[in-house]
Image (tube, helix red, strand yellow):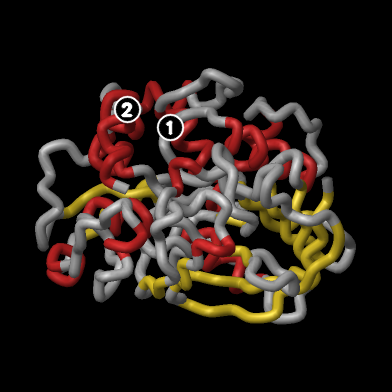
Amino acid sequence: MSNRHSRWKSSLAALSLAALLSPAWAAAAQRPLGSGSKGPDVVKAQILLDRAWFSSGEIDGRFSTNLRRAVLAYQRAQGLRATGKVDGATWTALQADAAPPFIDYTVTAQDADGPFARIPKDPMARAQLKSLDYESVQEALAERFHMSQGLLTSLNRGKRFKAGDVVSVANVGDAAAPKGARSVQIDKSERLLMVLDAGDKVVAAFPVSIGGPRDPLPVGKLKIVNEVQNPSFTYDPALLKSASKDHEKVEMKPGPNNPVGTMWLGLSKPHWGIHGTPDPARLGREETNGCVHMTNWDARRLSTLARVGTVVDVRP
């Protein structure tokens, strides 16, 4: 994931913790947000939505299509006018959560020591590694706090992320899980996975990547048949239309940079599942080989709401 860092760094250079916590920003954070918006107020909206379990994927300070999808789902769940913009009514609803958007975190020796690994692109080379670990402490902490690496490092300029360093991170860890989850619905056109209660009210929503025309996610009802934490991954070129002809069937070890991430929820369609991804920045912006991709943290959150036997209703 480190190859994305330069893109984030250039686009987020203007952000700083001082700007995010300044009284001027706090007063301005009520302004409407929509396509093209970026900066501190977008960061706050992303954090509040994440705390409400309406994820926009990575918290990165940009009003992306994933953020618009999260806002729409949240507005509908709250009975607000569905504009896809963070308007005044949406700000009011979100800020009923009075928790601070950022907290201090002290980097531990375990954080700083890893293990870390350089992850090769070639699947054959990846299969030789004993584990598919994070590539850096920044990557590990960014994922733990649902942030892009660019935002994390921009907020903590001058920090080396060594043991004992106190860094500022998004306050997403203590948000209470929604209650009453009964089923899962995937909206293919919106690339959004929603968790519904018994009354079909949406209680959580997450952006996803899905298969394209060559590997389309079938419309209809499936079921979750198994859940595996920290799965290994069987790379079988016979099942992947994009695989190189000289590749062989190999097993890749578990780890956050494993192609299926840190959580696998197998579906009743053989070889298909809902799972994490080692590249959260691309979520919702790419086609998969058939499976449903989520961020690693959202896949883990989904596993606390959906169990084996849960119906997954795929809509066009």
For label 1, the SS is: loop
Q: Residue 255 or 114: which is nearer the viewer? A: 255
Q: Position of residue 159 (x, y in %)?
A: 12, 44
Residue 225 locus on image (x, y percent): 70, 80
Label 1 environment density (alpha carbons within 10 Å; few <14, some 14–19, many ≥20): many
Q: How many marks?
A: 2
Residue labelled with disc 2:
12
Residue at position x 17%, y 54% from top? 166
Q: CA distance from mark 1 to mark 2?
A: 8 Å
Q: Is residue 95 visible?
A: no
Question: SS of the residue at dot 2?
Answer: loop
Q: Residue furthest right?
A: 199
- The quadrant of the picture occupied by the C terminus is top right
Q: Give coordinates of residue 175: x percent, y percent.
A: 52, 60
For image coordinates 55% across by 64% down, the residue present is: 238
Image side of residue 75 versus residue 14, left or right: right
Q: Are marks 1 and 2 in contact (CB under 8 Å)?
A: yes
Q: Is residue 92 visible?
A: yes
Query: How many other residues sit within 10 Å of disc 2, few (<14), some (14-19) or many (≥20)?
Result: many
Res 83 → quadrant: top right
Closer to us: 61 or 299 = 299
Circle nearer the N terminus (1, 2) = 2
The residue under label 1 is 61
The foreground one among 183 and 216 is 216
Callout 1 amino acid: Gly
Q: Residue furthest front?
A: 246
Say what amino acid the circle numbered 2 marks. Answer: Leu
Give the numbered dot on residue 200.
none
Residue at 30% x, 67% y: name it: 132
> Taking 221 as reference, is 101 above or below it?
above
Tell me the residue at 37%/73% (across/down).
254
How far across and down, in percent of the image, does residue 120 sit? 26, 54
